[in-house]
Amino acid sequence: MTARPPLALVTGANRGLGREVCHQLRDRGHHVILTARDTDRGQAAARDLGVEFHQLDVSDDASVEHLVADLRRVHPEGLDVVVANAGVALDGFNAEVAATTVDTNYFGVLRIVEAVLPLLNPGAHLVVVSSGVGQRDLLGPQLRPRFNLEQLKIAELSALMRQFVADVRSGHHRDAGWPSTAYGTSKIGATALAHVLTRELAGDPRNLSVVAVCPGWVRTDMGGPNGERDVASGAVSILSGLDVPPSEPHRFFRDGAPANW
């Protein structure tokens, strides 16, 4: 009997880094499910790459539920790799920018993680695309202790992300210790999520690996034309997360090496 190829799901993948991650996973021999919010663009990208497509909006609970239902029906063998890549970087800074950014870059990851956890096979990899821009030293001294990764729970982390949006809306975010960057704050949350999930899943017999990765500053529509590296290099950094053993306590990597945050 021929062994089936590992099954990989990539979010936010109709262009840029997500598309290139699909390309590289395909070339590694994975069966790839490319997901995107825009059906036409996603289908076109999947067709070009010769991979499967599924529509997905990570900010829509119903869309996530539909994905999981279809995965159970079409791919009962389960998932081996999930790359949570979908994200936004919006111009400006106000309450609406903060709300949209956090909902996509943090809660969008959390929605996918919680939805697909039951579908992950033993030894599966969950890679969260974060950023070195999300440095904890952006936080004021009154906030940093609340991001204690040895004790923080997912519900508490989610409450902190909601509080950031509320503090921006009230005009008191600086007094509360938050930086004036929605993208950076959302990525602090995404990186923290990988660490907290690793701790909470330590007893799972499937020996799952959850890691946050930084692709670097990449020349994409989101990163702009002045990025330091090309899309292929950024995708290699993302997929280096597949090589991080579950026993490694540090859960934030760039180019295969532990990264500071």
Image (cartoon, helix red, strand yellow):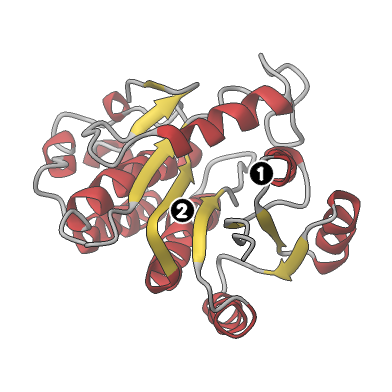
The quadrant holding residue 148 is top left
Type of amino acid at the residue the image marks with label 2: Val
Which image quarter holds the C terminus? top left
Locate residue 212 relative to residue 29 in the image: left or right: left
Towards the viewer: 57 or 75? 75
User: Picture coordinates of residue 112 (x, y %)?
Assistant: 48, 65
Towards the viewer: 23 or 42? 23
Q: Which residue is drawn at 11% across and 37% down?
A: 145
Towards the viewer: 233 or 169? 233
Disc 1 crowd, CA 10 A, few/some/many (<14, 14-19, 20+): many
Which image quarter holds the N terminus? bottom right
Q: Which residue is drawn at 85% across and 55% down?
A: 50
**Looking at the image, is mark 1 or mark 2 earlier in the sequence?**
1
Give the Cα distance between marks 1 and 2: 28 Å
Q: In this view, does 62 lie above or below 129?
A: below
Q: Is residue 184 visible?
A: no
Label 2 secondary element: helix
Q: In this view, does 251 lie above or below 71?
A: above
Q: Can residue 94 be seen in this view?
A: yes
User: Picture coordinates of residue 250 (x, y %)?
Assistant: 26, 31
Residue corresponding to mark 1: 25
Type of amino acid at the residue the image marks with label 1: Leu
User: Picture coordinates of residue 86 (x, y %)?
Assistant: 60, 52
Locate residue 202 relative to residue 18 in the image: left or right: left
Towards the viewer: 218 or 139? 218
Residue corresponding to mark 2: 102
